[in-house]
Image (tube, rainbow, N blue to C red):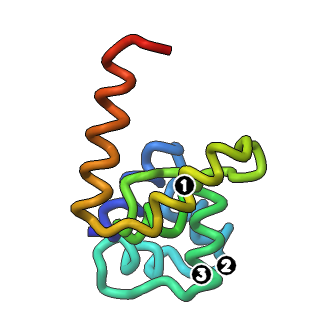
Amino acid sequence: MYPNRIRELRIEKGITQIALSIELEVTQETISAYETGKNLPSTSNLLKLSRILSASMDYILMMSPIRTPIDTSTMVNDERRLLTYFRMLGNVQKEKALSYLQGLCDSGDR
């Protein structure tokens, strides 16, 4: 649940609810409501939370296990192509592709 993730990330960063509320320009009660799931952050506050907590919005919302988004600007062309093709696959095909890639990596042939 994302409410626990907000709390988890806040504590990990050593930020109090009060300090976070000041950053977001909301009350401490609002932060508490976010963390307990009683209230949802607005899109703009979710964006601010992402920046403050150094985590992607998808990670905060439990939509991705990847904490920080991939910076495609540092990728070489082959990496971009691989990611583009991977995103076009269905779930079963993705699993097969990942298994194949893992096998290539495990073989030691580089």
List the residue tagged with mark 3: 26
Q: Is residue 22 above or below residue 84?
A: below
Q: Amino acid at mark 1?
A: Leu
Residue drawn where x is 32% and y is 44% of the image: 98
Q: Amino acid at mark 2?
A: Glu
Disc 3: CA contacts within 10 A as few (<14), some (14-19) or many (>=20): few
| Left or right, residue 64 beside residue 15 | left
Q: Is residue 13 above or below residue 38?
A: above
Q: Is residue 56 visible?
A: yes
Tell me the mark number nearer the camera, choosing from 2 and 1: 1
Q: Is residue 24 above or below residue 65?
A: below
Q: Is residue 9 above or below residue 59?
A: above
| Label 2–label 1 contact, CB within 8 A | no
Nearest to the observer: residue 42 or residue 104 = 104
Pick whichever of labels 2 and 1 is earlier in the sequence.
Answer: 2
Give the image location of residue 38, x and y in percent.
30, 86
Secondary structure state at the residue bearing disc 2: loop
Residue drawn where x is 55% and y is 80% of the image: 27
Disc 1: CA contacts within 10 A as few (<14), some (14-19) or many (>=20): few
Q: Amino acid at mark 3?
A: Val
List the residue tagged with mark 2: 25
Q: Measure how far apart labels 2 and 3 are at the Cα level.
A: 4 Å
Secondary structure state at the residue bearing disc 3: loop
Secondary structure state at the residue bearing disc 1: helix
Residue drawn where x is 68% and y is 67% of the image: 23
List the residue tagged with mark 1: 83
Q: Quadrant of residue 29?
A: bottom left
| Label 2–label 3 contact, CB within 8 A | yes
Pick whichever of labels 1 and 3 is earlier in the sequence.
Answer: 3
